[in-house]
Amino acid sequence: MNARTRRVLSLGNLRAFEAVARRLSFSDAAEELFVTQSAISRQIKTLEDELGAALFTRGTRHVELTQSGRVLQRSVESGLGQIDASVRQIRQARSRKRVSVTTFASFGSLWLLPRIEAFQRQHPDIDIRVSATDMIADLDDPELDISLRYCSPAQAPEGAVRLFGEVLTPVVSRSLLEQIRRGQAPPLATPADLALHTLAEEDDTKASTEFLSWRHWLKLNGEPSLEPKRWLYLNFTYQQVQAALAGHGVALARIALVFEALQRGELVEPFGPERRSGSPFLYWMIISPIGKLRPEVTQFCDWVVEQARITRQAIGEEPIASVSRPSAGPPQAGPRPRGGSAGVLAGRGAVIPRRAR
């Protein structure tokens, strides 16, 4: 191995390269880094000499990356991003404590955010950052501590904590139910009556959507070919819930996300709990390796686990009478969901080891 291959590259030179590669301009990179254009040029020339390869082709009015430059850019962008995130995390650790959570939009809106204030009352010295996205976040990112996700057991990574399962039920607003009782809206006593109503449907192509769909529920309840008065297609679960609350139709709601609205009487199950259905997809908590080392993240995770226990009771996975001890048997409270119930009811509150999946 010669001296060139062993030489450590200068971080300053790599930062200069990243800025030029991103902006495709030596002058813009110099302005961003608060140095002169000639200084940027010297850094790039030094880096090219160290690598033994040209990184840019320089024209009169433009700069382009060479093949070697494109290869280096991919690694440098990722590496500098992780370094910068780690530095920010270290600086934050010396100031206020913060927990960063990523989750999908409907779970954040309907389950997490309504409960956050209770955690902050108990822990006023901990700030919470919630990133709501349907993209699966990489927990190798030092800025992320916890991911709250929805997937099948086979998709859950090793060490993921099962929070609760999925139970679905048709719901309408209290106001729509009153209209039905007064004869001001069509009847809604049996699944066949759904042909007289608007059905709010999740418009998505994910595998889990099959079990969240009205078609799946209608098939389980003896109406596979039923067509409603109209369909209302919506992208997110929380939009379906909002549509039902506004009296715009019947939504197939996830009980774990709306049980408080059911308890308050804002939403009503027109067919009762006997028509609930299940799904093999579950809700999980995944903790980053770095997050596990921080006390504030542990405190937040303990709080999430406790809130999940309350949710399991609400959807009938865990009997209320046995809250002080773990239960290995089948749930004793609430009806057994139809369709996918085995997946829903298995392994409550467990950490999934690799061999169990």
Image: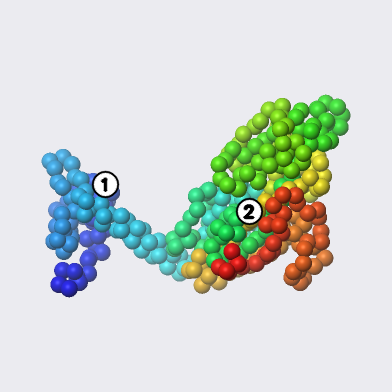
Q: Which mark is residue 322?
A: none
Q: In which quadrant will I find the N terminus?
A: bottom left
**Residue 321 screen position, x and y as percent:** 82, 65
Q: Nearer the viewer, mark 2 or mark 1?
A: 2
Q: Around disc 1, counting alpha carbons within 10 Å, would you say few (fewer than 14), some (14 to 19), or many (20 or more)?
A: some
Image: 213 above or below 327: above
Categorize mark 2 by other alpha carbons within 10 Å: few (<14), some (14-19), many (20+): many
List the residue tagged with mark 2.
Answer: 281
Residue 320's image quarter? bottom right
Cα separation between marks 2 and 1:
43 Å
Q: Secondary structure at mark 2?
A: strand
Of marks 2 and 1, which one's residue comes earlier in the chain?
Answer: 1
Query: Which three-letter amino acid code belongs to the residue tagged 1?
Result: Arg
The x, y position of residue 165, in whole percent, is: 68, 56
Q: Amino acid at mark 2?
A: Phe
Viewer can see residue 123 = no
For label 1, the SS is helix
Quarter that holds the C terminus = bottom right
Image spot of residue 290 (x, y percent) = 48, 68
Tag 1 residue? 23
Question: In the rendered image, which quarter is residue 2 located in?
Answer: bottom left
**Residue at the right extreme, as displayed:** 182
Q: Position of residue 21 (x, y in %)?
A: 25, 50
Looking at the image, which residue is at 46% across and 58% down?
A: 138
Task: Assess whether mark 1 and mark 2 are in contact (beta carbons under 8 angstroms).
Answer: no
Residue at 60% across / 48% down in the picture?
208
